Image (spheres, grey):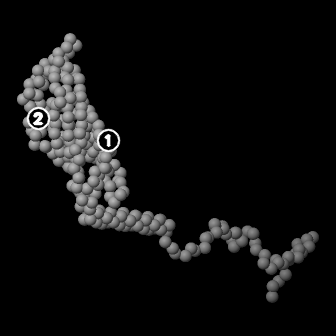
Amino acid sequence: MSTPSPRIAGQQAKPILQKPPGYRDPNGPQARPRPIGPPRKPPIPPSFPAKRRRKSCCRVCCCCFCFFIVLLIILIVIAGALFYLWFDPKLPVFHLQSFSFRHFNVSVKSDGTYLHAATLTRVEARNPNGKLRYYYGHTDVEVSAGKDKEIDLGTGSVPGFTQGTKNARSLKIETKTDELVEDGMGPRLMSHHKSKDLVVNVVVKTTVAVIVQGRKTRPLAVKVTCGGQSLKALDKMPKCTIHFLKWISIH
């Protein structure tokens, strides 16, 4: 048995207060509040990342575009092959049919030496196609003399026309000039003209369109160069050279 503690004289005993249920001592180690962190996000179910989706969409678009381009090329090739087999297209053929001086004279005046000349040129245009026709727009023709085309003999023009299948047409061009030349060139021109050693050049500039079953294609600019030879060689009706697209030349 416990013995009662001695009481000090003059003091009264204080009653001991009972702690209510659920009471926690603020100074105790268990009473300190735990730090509360940021709320956790609920777990997301696994899925493909957004970058992979974008890459897959780009790949699909590129594959579709490449497939469309390849299909278009194949269709164009097939259409071109069928067109070639059915129509058997051929380019027109040009010849310098004839060239002559109707008048040629050199005169010396006080202000210089002049060349008086008049020419008559015929250029033959032939269509070798049996199913295609050609349409020629307004045609300009330039005539010159000399290896470097230093002597201008004038220009002429031919109105537009349509050329049928298996057809040949002669273009008649007349030119005239009264050109001032160098003093020493006059006698040389007269000598070359008499000996037929004078070099003649003819340049034809026009536009050509193909007529397919009544439908006309877009005109194409064409330049035809003829001559570049002496008057003696022109008797053989030399073939002309066709230039188009600025870099294609066909003789």
The residue indicated by pointer 2 is 231
Marks 1/2: CA–CA distance? 27 Å
Q: Nearer the viewer, residue 158 or 18?
A: 158
- Relative to 80, 192 lies left or right: left
**Marked residue nearer the N-terminal end (1 or 2):** 1
The residue shown at (20%, 29%) is 118
The residue shown at (31%, 49%) is 162
Q: Is residue 18 visible?
A: yes
The residue indicated by pointer 1 is 159
- Relative to 2, 221 lies left or right: left
Q: Is residue 150 visible?
A: no
Q: Nearer the viewer, residue 9 or 208?
A: 208
Task: State the residue lying farthest toward the left.
Answer: 195
Q: Quadrant of the N terminus?
A: bottom right
Question: Label 1's element?
Answer: loop
Task: State the residue lying farthest toward the bottom.
Answer: 1
Task: State the residue lying farthest toward the top.
Answer: 110
The residue shown at (16%, 36%) is 99
Q: Amino acid at mark 2?
A: Leu
